[in-house]
Amino acid sequence: MSKTLALTEELISLSSVTPEDKGCQQRLIELLTPLGFKCETVQSGEVTNLWARHGTAQPLIVFAGHTDVVPTGPVTAWQSNPFVPTHRDGKLYGRGAADMKTSIAAMVVAVEEFLAAHPAHQGSIGFLITSDEEGPATDGTVVVCEMLKERGEQLDCCIVGEPTSSNELGDVIKNGRRGTMSGKLTVKGIQGHIAYPQLAKNPIHLAMPALAELASIEWDQGNEYYLPTSWQMSNIHGGTGASNVIPGEIVIDFNFRFSTASTVEGLQQRLQAVLDSHGLEYELKWTVGGLPFLTPRGSLSDAISKAIKEETGIDTELSTTGGTSDGRFIAQICPQVVEFGPPNGSIHKIDEHIELRFIDPLKNIYRRTLENLLL
């Protein structure tokens, strides 16, 4: 059994459902300390974070990831225990196999091999690991990034081990993610008997023209890396439950997934202008879940693309699709952030798995990337 597979299985066996770490990071410390890493545990609330650094020189290349996993769902629906790593049909099954304990194991072993072969390498290597990526993400990577910013530690490149590949290992890497901003809109009316509409004010009728206009707006055209910004309604709540009562208000939940072609302030102002133009009486609450980040083609994406080509023969695709990740926090203190990991087809699902044939090549790609950047 390879070192990467063995470590992956060891991590899967630790049931680290958010925000629990269950000893995963302590195991990483046990492996990294003998390699010369200075390891710091950063506790924040129930969340355990790890910052580890080898060397003091620039550039600083950081591997980032999370030890926490999502809940298993009904265990009886799994073909095998989700926290007992199991091999079937050339695949490794277990919660976290794809998202993202294999990536963490591959990163650690890749660094071990790199340091053994190149002890006099340039620069430094770091690890930023959290147990709060799958949850609120308020006590995890963002806390460590703030600590590093206050200390003046400059990150130059960061590789986040998110499962980015689509069908084959290396076919997609993420060089950015869209931002997410949610809103809760309450449109006011006057409740009344449905037989006397002249004595009431129906907020459903009042809101619909504005909502139709918002749904038709082209918020931006995107750019080379991003699709156009999307505005979508997710929930509409109105009415008392009775069929003969005009409600006093309607509540609409919506979300922007937006690119670097738009700003938080600009989107908010444009939406509120539409509401005002329809003369609505409303309340609006905003929640910014994450800002977009983008790493244009450069030394980091070139280094990973070259490593993927050398290891797999695949010409990788740069992409910014998908949800948010901790890359949004790291990008605030690091000029180049990309995400790369195994295929994501089974993440968060029952019977999550990774094909065994991808595990060591993933480790090799991480090692080759270090060689491309630090030699």
Image (cartoon, rainbow, N blue to C red):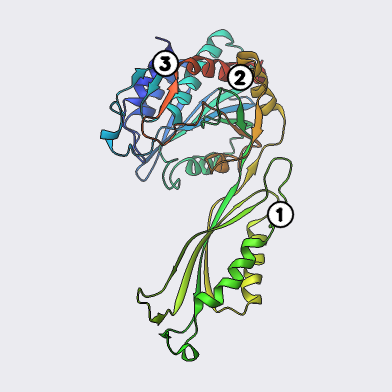
Identify the element where label 2 is drawn.
helix
Position in image of residue 23 (x %, y %): 33, 29
* Front one among 307 and 147: 307
- Label count reads 3
The mark found on residue 90 in the picture is: 3
Q: Which is more toward the observer, 150 or 145?
A: 145
Coordinates of residue 278 in the picture (x, y in percent): 63, 77
Q: Are marks 3 and 2 in contact (CB under 8 Å)?
A: no
Question: Where does label 1 land, which residue?
Answer: 220
Q: Is residue 107 left or right of residue 276?
A: left
Q: Which residue is mark 2?
A: 370
Task: Tell me which amino acid carries mark 3.
Answer: Gly
Amino acid bearing label 1: Asp
> Residue at (47%, 72%) from the top-left corner?
250
Are the residues tagged 2 and 1 within 8 Å (C-beta)? no
The residue under the point 50% across, 84% down is 201
Residue located farthest toward the left when viewing the structure as drawn? 76
Of circles 3 and 2, the one toward us is 3
